[in-house]
Image: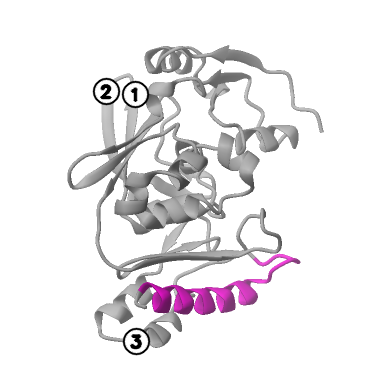
Amino acid sequence: MIPAEVRYHRAGSVDEALRLLAEHGEEAKLLAGGHSLLPLMKLRLAVPEVLVDVGGLRELAFVEDAGDAVRIGALTRHHDLATSALLARELPLLARAAGTVGDPQVRHRGTLGGSLAHGDAAGDLPAVVLALDGVLVLTGPGGTREVPAAEFFVDFFETALAPDEVLTEVRVPKRAGGWDFQKFTRRASDWAVVGVAVAGDAVALVNMGATPLRARAVEAALAAGSTPAEAAERAAEGTSPADEPTASAEYRRHLARVLVRRALENSRA
């Protein structure tokens, strides 16, 4: 399908983007890499009247050491995450997962902030940032506020980002210990049928509910001394996976148990 008619503005700064959002209200949508929003517009599942393009704001594209955390600009592209020496050293889980997103074209255009703001439970990076206890910095007319990833993802394609705010930065605490990222796809560039991010004893799930989820039952089992195999048996508890022709809910629950076990065992190898 052809997208509906839309007015286009290219913001030259965060302040200009905020002004345009305030001017047009809920009629406006931010455009970064475009790999989440544009497909929805083509299908008429999203019909914004105004696009505010922030893709050229290079001041929001960075990966910086901040002592006990790593600061990442919201417009940092997946390829830059995957090839960052700092992330490879301090947050290898994020670098690894970013390198598996889509295909090279997607990784060279898609952004971390766009993926998080889109709030798709099938996206890899929302679950990874959730497992890593990341904090999202939202900038609006009243200044900035920080929202933990655990509070950012609200419902199906719904986040804590207000219509007049811009996601400008993600802060991820450095952490030692084991990690692993597993996902099962029908084809290499597809969305994950199910995915798992493990950071120490934190476990997050991709595509097992309306939002990215922490596998709290698995984490509780590990804390109680269960083996990875024992803990993984609880991977589907508290989830609500979609029941679809290509992957039933029961199949997804099975995959969650299998992939959590693999990820836990690999993270401890």
Q: Viewed as shown, does residue 199 lie left or right of 120?
A: left
Which residue is identified by label 2?
143
CB-based contact (under 8 Å), mark 1 and mark 2: yes
| Labels 1 and 3: the sequence-earlier one | 1
Front residue of this view, candidates 222 and 20: 222
Q: Viewed as shown, does residue 39 lie left or right of 63?
A: right
Crowd band around label 1 with a 10 angstrom C-alpha radius: few (<14), some (14–19), many (20+): many
Tell me if I can see residue 113 in this picture.
yes
Give the residues in magenta: 243-267
Front residue of this view, candidates 105 and 190: 105
| Labels 3 and 2: the sequence-earlier one | 2
Which residue is identified by label 1?
140
Front residue of this view, candidates 83 and 30: 83
Q: Residue furthest right?
A: 1
Crowd band around label 2 with a 10 angstrom C-alpha radius: few (<14), some (14–19), many (20+): few
Element carrying mark 1: strand
Please tell me in which quadrant of the rendered image residue 184 appears.
Answer: bottom right
